[in-house]
Image (cartoon, grey):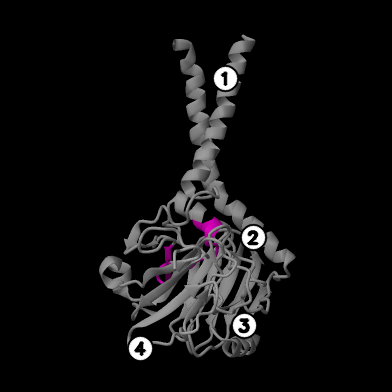
Amino acid sequence: MIRWIGPLAVFMITAVGAHWATLAYAPSVIMDRALSTMKNRGISEHAFTTPQRITPQTQAVVRSSPDLFYSLCRYDLIDAESVLRVTMGEWSDYQSLSFFDGNTNNFHRVRGEDKSVEVQLVGPGSTREGSVQSPTAKGIVLIRRLAPTQALFDQAKQVAAGDGCELIAP
Amino acid sequence: MITRALTYGLAAIIGVGAGVTSALLMSGLWSTKQPMEFSNINVDGWVSDFAVGSEEASPYVRARVARHGLLALAKSEAVYFMRNVDEEGLPFSEACDYRISGGALPAQWWSITLYQTSDSMLPMNDDGALSIDATSIVADSASWTARIAAERPDDDANWISSRNSGGFDLLLRLYVPRDDLLERPETALTPPSIERLSCKGDAA
């Protein structure tokens, strides 16, 4: 009986370790895959990509809403000096600007009904004050606008001309 | 000595396999797991977890949301309720027609969207009727009804198409939720009810 204690301990330790490692790394692996998929589908880095209306034929992300206008910008702030200026144009109905890190966390969000919004984003290594800091170097900025009809979606696309996602430093 | 080393090696391999498999099953990353099974809020069969989208979420919730609800917002901006069974506890099916009824909901804007259970994507059809929302619903005073069916009904202005979905679930989005919904969802929310009307193969 005693000779099984060692293997049993190894089994328990590796099982617990593998269990928590799977949970810990799953979001970053899934996000990394999503970023690659978006890149392959033409979602720009450091620029908003004008979206198509969400339909069964155009959907790229699970549980996208067909009632919302989504505009995406991938970012990579590995350089500690990098600053990303993100601007959301004015929209008369609900709209929000949200930031997701490489672990899928929605670490910052701003609502902007009837106003435009500007946020300066820096990476995890930055010491710059007055900016929003991303917990990871890579992530996604997402604008959502309420646009449940084709006409409203077309209007949202026009407003999107005032959106911006650009590196202003270094 | 070699036998002993092999025993330890085998124990480690089985341990890793057991650890990875249990994590996949418990988090809902394994495809047989039902979405939202770890939800901690249940209002009349509509389930939610307000930790979605934030770092407060448990590792299990974060892993599952990453798989089934990537880019979900934190609760101050939006909350999500999901339902995958009818009033009798049977899974939603494309083979059945349903009536969904509701009233005012405690948020600035809401929508209900149908997703296929198999991969959490919109079902592949061109009906243009995958959701209803607060701005487009045709309502009688504060209450409204809609039909969920694979074919457009003759008598209902409000329709959610289930065509080509197989099995499906419904996602209720509540944008800019009221404070009382976040604090006391069980009393603040009166969610839509869903009644199964008929299924293909039912006796006439």
SS under mark 4:
loop
Asked if badge 1 and badge 2 are on a common chain, one would say no
Magenta stretch in the rendered image: B65-83
Label whose residue precedes the other's in the sequence (1 or 4):
1
SS under mark 1:
helix
- Residue B6 drawn above or below residue B37: above
Label 1–label 4 contact, CB within 8 A: no
SS under mark 3:
loop
Which quarter of the rendering shows the N terminus of chain B? top right
The residue depicted at 53 percent of the width and 83 percent of the height is: A148
- Kindly identify which numbered label has been placed on residue A163: 3
Residue type (three-letter) at the residue carrying disc 3? Asp
Residue type (three-letter) at the residue carrying disc 2? Ala
Asked if badge 3 and badge 4 are on a common chain, one would say no
Label 3–label 2 contact, CB within 8 A: no
Pointer 2: residues within 10 angstroms few (<14), some, or many (20+)?
some
- Residue A166 drawn above or below residue A75: below
Label 2–label 4 contact, CB within 8 A: no
- Kindly identify which numbered label has been placed on residue A114: none
- Kindly identify which numbered label has been placed on residue A34: 2
Which quarter of the rendering shows the C terminus of chain B? bottom left
Name the residue tied to disc 1: B8
Name the residue tied to disc 4: B140
Image location of residue B192, percent across then percent down: 36, 73
The residue depicted at 44 percent of the width and 85 percent of the height is: B137
Q: Give the Cα distance between marks 3 and 4.
A: 38 Å
